[in-house]
Image (cartoon, rainbow, N blue to C red):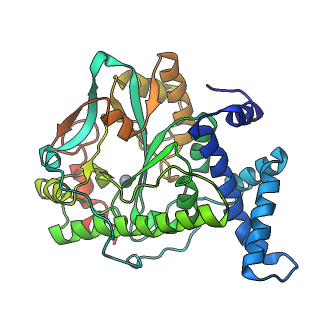
């Protein structure tokens, strides 16, 4: 499961008969084609749009089957893009503000956010979750190391994406959507604090994010046609899961989520600390805290330091103990959710001080 060399993984991906292997291959092709789309503008030929698309698809196809080209492009992605704050900030609301799709009410949400799942038979399962937070006043990054590593190791994960973050990283979201390993959840528009926001503003933070997802989902479906990605797995019409920014919750927030049909998902294990996380000591601390049915909180927006190294240590430790990684959706299907009304990191009240640290309603403004 943890091959030493990249080419072993690639070989594995090719010989994998399952949907997952195919999806991953198509994902890479999509990433490639999207990356090329920008580069094609410089090609010294004039062609009609349709012919250009045709040429692009053929070019991407050819490159994909040449390992060295593919690896080079992935390296470019790792080195040149996705650095934190490399993108100009844009605090305007999304292009549309009323989502096309909605969910039936979820009354269970009133009882609290899900912190973990009680697994029948205590099978060693846990869910890796990664938050992509972004305040109104600044942009954050995209941790390509983490995402590529998850793909190389065929590890499912759930990303809780801020709506504004999705827009700042539109191309990356379009790529993630083509990979069946990954599941997306809503992490509010600009990281609003749900212990402070008015009910009206809570709805905006949630629904603006649902709208941004719809915009990018429609784009991802167009990408499938345009780049002949060939993925058949359905893209969910709507994000079903929600994560409270700062872990801050309130009864009013839980009621609104219940009404809008979203499921609040917390964590029972916080992976990162405020310091440098690339240490075996921190990894041991995290691994020791895991139980069957645990939900782990990581970040993949390049804000905490050392997340990628910590992830590798933690995954290796858990693998040695016989743990298997599943998405939040799969974990919920395996047992009974454990809910709590109060949102916190490790012990109740440990995040209340954050109410005063991040500007208006937690959004940084
Ligand atoms: Zn966050």
Residue closer to the observer: 274 or 219: 219
Task: Point out the image quarter for the N terminus.
Answer: top right
Q: How many marks?
A: 0
Give the vertical position of 176 relative to 339 (above or below). below
Question: x and y percent of residue 206 in the render?
Answer: 29, 64
Give the vertical position of 238 relative to 129 (above or below). below
Give the vertical position of 110 relative to 276 (above or below). below
Task: Point out the image quarter for the C terminus.
Answer: bottom left
x 29%, y 45%: residue? 265
Q: Is residue 364 visible?
A: no
x 57%, y 40%: residue? 19
Question: x and y percent of residue 106 in the render?
Answer: 18, 51
Question: x and y percent of residue 26 in the render?
Answer: 65, 50
Q: Is residue 199 visible?
A: yes
Q: Quadrant of residue 121?
A: top left
Residue closer to the observer: 346 or 265: 265
Please give left or right for residue 52 compared with residue 365 in the image.
Answer: right
Please give left or right for residue 285 compared with residue 315 in the image.
Answer: left
Please give left or right for residue 32 compared with residue 93 in the image.
Answer: right
x 70%, y 54%: residue? 79
Question: x and y percent of residue 227 in the render?
Answer: 67, 63
x 78%, y 72%: residue? 40
Residue closer to the observer: 357 or 58: 58
Q: Quadrant of residue 51?
A: bottom right
């Amino acid at each position: 499961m943890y091959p030493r060399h990249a080419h072993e993984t690639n070989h594995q991906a090719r010989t994998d008969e399952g949907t997952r292997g195919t999806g991953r291959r198509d994902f890479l092709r999509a990433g490639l084609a999207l990356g090329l789309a920008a580069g094609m503008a410089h090609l010294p030929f004039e062609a009609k749009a349709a012919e250009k698309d045709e040429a692009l698809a053929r070019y991407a196809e050819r490159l994909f089957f040449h390992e060295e080209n593919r690896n080079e492009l992935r390296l470019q992605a790792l080195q040149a893009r996705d650095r934190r704050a490399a993108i100009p900030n844009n605090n305007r609301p999304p292009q549309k503000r009323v989502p096309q799709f909605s969910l039936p009410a979820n009354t269970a949400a009133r009882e609290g956010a899900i912190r973990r799942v009680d697994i029948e038979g205590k099978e060693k399962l846990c869910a890796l979750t990664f938050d992509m937070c972004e305040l109104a006043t600044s942009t954050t990054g995209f941790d390509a190391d983490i995402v590529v590593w998850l793909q190389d190791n065929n590890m499912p994960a759930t990303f809780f994406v801020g709506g504004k973050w999705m827009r700042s990283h539109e191309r990356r979201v379009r790529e993630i959507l083509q990979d069946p390993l990954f599941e997306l959840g809503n992490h509010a528009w600009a990281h609003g604090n749900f212990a402070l926001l008015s009910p009206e503003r809570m709805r905006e933070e949630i629904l603006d994010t649902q709208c941004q997802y719809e915009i990018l989902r429609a784009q991802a479906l167009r990408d499938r046609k345009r780049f002949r990605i060939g993925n058949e797995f359905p893209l969910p019409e709507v994000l079903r899961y929600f994560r409270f920014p700062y872990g801050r919750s309130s009864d009013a927030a839980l009621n609104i989520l219940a009404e809008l049909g979203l499921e609040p998902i917390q964590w029972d294990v916080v992976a990162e600390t405020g310091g440098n996380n690339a240490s075996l000591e921190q990894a041991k601390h995290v691994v020791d805290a895991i139980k069957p049915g645990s939900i782990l909180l990581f970040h993949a927006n390049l804000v905490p330091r050392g997340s990628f190294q910590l992830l590798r240590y933690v995954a290796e430790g858990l693998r040695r103990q016989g743990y298997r990684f599943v998405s939040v959706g799969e974990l919920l299907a395996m047992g009974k959710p454990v809910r709590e009304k109060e949102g916190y990191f490790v012990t109740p009240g440990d995040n209340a001080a954050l109410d005063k640290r991040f500007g208006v309603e937690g959004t940084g403004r």
